[in-house]
Image: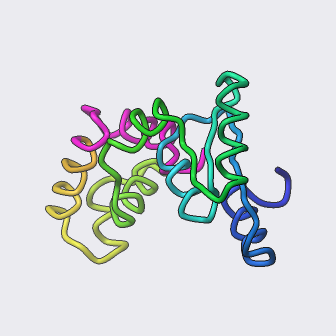
Amino acid sequence: MPDMNGIDAIRAIRNEFQNARIIVLTTYHGDALARRALEAGAAGYLLKSMLRKELLETIRAVHAGRRRIPPEIATEHFTQDALTEREIQILRKVGAGGSNKIIASEPSISEATVKARMKNILSKLGTSDRTHAVTMAMKRGFLDG
């Protein structure tokens, strides 16, 4: 979408039309994106690769006032640990090439705290290094690409 991202569009629609029932249909598998879409007011979340039956069931459920996330998406995307806002901020700075020392100076936290948070981030994302963590965070939708 040229003027805003999908999450902002959901919020804008819900602000103007509070009873709008929105289903996200996407090719993007990111669990953070799915979670943010639902928090913004979407009632359903589907991947374009899903069967037509899933689409019809979701439309019917959302039309009836229920939320609908197919089990395979819920199982895959909502059981993993979420990153905190602070961890996301740190990952953004890592992605921009920041060292622990530089990252520590900007939000006024110690370098040891940055190292501890990076350790948590690596564990939550199931990665072994900073570069892979940034890549995985982008893939899961924590960071914009």
Q: Residue at x 51, y 36 (%)?
A: 139
Locate residue 23, reporting x and y percent: 70, 49
Q: Residue 17, relative to residue 121: is it above or below? A: below
Quadrant position of the C terminus in the picture: top right
Asked if residue 131 is among those painted magenta in the image, a careful observer would answer yes
Q: Residue 26, relative to residue 109: is it above or below? A: above
Front residue of this view, candidates 42 and 4: 42
In-image side of 119 versus 99 (left or right): left
Q: Residue at x 64, y 32 (%)?
A: 47
- By secondary structure, the bulk of the magenta-drawn segment is best described as helix
Front residue of this view, candidates 92 and 120: 120
Q: Residue at x 41, y 62 (%)?
A: 89
**Quarter of image, res 14:** bottom right
Q: Farthest residue in the front direction?
A: 64
Q: Residue at x 54, y 48 (%)?
A: 34
User: Which residue range is magenta in the image?
Assistant: 123-145
Locate residue 69, reporting x and y percent: 54, 42
Front residue of this view, candidates 5 and 109: 5
Locate residue 41, reporting x and y percent: 62, 64
Q: Residue 127, relative to residue 14: is it above or below? A: above
Locate residue 80, reporting x and y percent: 32, 42
In-image side of 86 versus 54 (left or right): left
In-image side of 69 versus 10 (left or right): left
**Quarter of image, res 7:** bottom right
